[in-house]
Amino acid sequence: MKPILAIAKLTLKAAFRFRIVALLALFLVVSVTALPLLIKDDGTARGFVQILLTYSMGLTVTTLGLATLWLSCGILARDIEDCRIQLVVVKPVARWKIWMGKWLGILILNAMLLGASGLVIYGLLEYRGGKLNEDQKFVLENEVFVARGSAKEEAVDLTQTVEEIFQDRMKQSSLEDVDQAQLKKQIFEMLKHQFQLVPQSMMREWDIPLGVNPAELKDKPLYLRTKFIAMSHKSTFEDTRTFPMFWEVGPMDSPQSWRVVMMMTPNVFHEIEVPPNLLDENGHLQVRFINNQNETFYFDVNEGMEVLYRQGGFLANYLKGLMILFCWLALLAAIGLSASSFLSFPVASFFAVSVLILGLSTGTMNQVVEEGGIVGVDSRTGKVEQQGVFDHISVFFFKELKNLTEVVLNFSPVELLSEGRTVTWWMVCKAVGQVVILVGGIFVALGVYCFSRRELALPSGGQG
């Protein structure tokens, strides 16, 4: 490790020789401090935290990400072009150690800048939180500045019901020319839709296992996070009506059950605080909605009902969120260094930014995969009329790239933190494994290989 650490130390010194590093640190501190003061929130605890975290952390990651790409492209490419790298490679140090030392140096610099920005953001959260009124401080401490676990109802197995309906339809009429898999899918969606509807004078019950020992949640409040749609409105997303919604929580027909009527608006997430100690002996929370309105309500199986419960404090949760953001920066550093291992600085910068833009273009990738190609797409059907070789290649390429991109982007620590949800250690480990080791490892291997094979003694820094 001594050669790698020595190269990392030299990389840090070289980075600080760039004035851009000092300016970057100053820009981050000033912008992170000033941005929340310029953007007004709604005065609630949740509002100011969401704005501060979303904008400040988003700005921090964007700025550090672009700076990481620029620095990682320049730190190696400039050394090669200016012939400074020859002073290192002539020493008894393997080239892969030089490359890894450069990467480690950039990671240390990112850790310093991300840590400083994270400290400023956390200080602003505490400062702004202290200026809230007592009611909002209570919301802040119990709903936002926490790490809350999430539990949902277990999925209902409709396989047997779907098969029974399918066989009944087969007996009634001949379906030999019908796509049986598609028909079963339609039956499943129909049953699923009916399962999510609550007509007038009917009840919908959720039996939600929290997956924890009931003693761990003793005397701790729970929160129902629910969202519904009123089916009679012509445009569900423009429905601004309010309905008195009757809720019952706790074991059925138990004197301990808690009942409440709340005025609620469709298409909006609502959080309902539930008194503690309502779990049954198995650690399940039973929630019932009784529809006494002249309306049919729709509760989506994914967003309709969720139980949030306290698991820990905000600071540890916040640090784990920063660790995931650091994994993204580590990947960007690997991309930049990999590009500069075989390209000149301007070309390496263009290549690295192109890779970043391509990775973020998930909408385009999805469209190409769904349409089945790029050339000859029918505007009416949205499908390629006749697939050629280029279409097959493009679909395969974008499908694999989409899968690889989802591995990297399948984390959203900022959203979790702003909603007071737990960033688990499992998420951090997955980010390290998937973002740094798996995807980052591909670029590390490519960069080390190209740098090891590159001829550095040629004129113009090895650019033949």
Image (tube, rainbow, N blue to C red):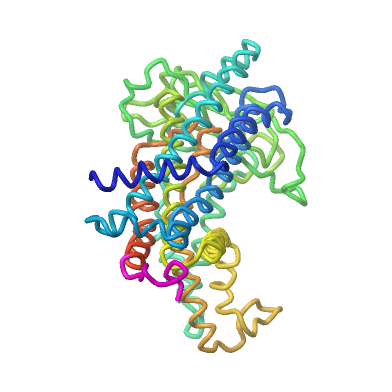
Left or right: 295 as drawn, with respect to 392: right
Q: Nearer the viewer, residue 424 or 67?
A: 67
Q: Residue at x 40, y 24 (%)?
A: 312
Residue stretch rendered in magenta on the structure: 452-464
Compared with 387, 429 (above or below) is above
Residue 362 seen in render:
no
Q: Residue at x 28, y 54 (%)?
A: 97
Left or right: 341 as drawn, with respect to 55: left
Compared with 57, 396 (above or below) is below
Compared with 205, 358 (above or below) is below
Q: Position of residue 278 (x, y in %)?
A: 42, 22
Q: Position of residue 274 (x, y in %)?
A: 51, 22
The quarter of the displayed image where residue 269 is located: top right
Q: Nearer the viewer, residue 458 or 64?
A: 458
Q: Nearer the viewer, residue 296 or 458?
A: 458
Residue 223 seen in render:
yes
Q: Residue at x 59, y 69 (%)?
A: 367
Q: Which quarter of the rendering shows the N terminus?
A: top left
Residue 435 counted in the magenta span = no
Q: Nearer the viewer, residue 9 or 169?
A: 9
Left or right: 259 as drawn, with respect to 82: right
Q: Position of residue 52 (x, y in %)?
A: 62, 30
Furthest residue in direction top, as rendered: 134
Q: Which quarter of the rendering shows the C terminus?
A: bottom left
Q: Position of residue 256 (x, y in %)?
A: 45, 18
Residue 459 counted in the magenta span = yes
Q: How many marks?
A: 0
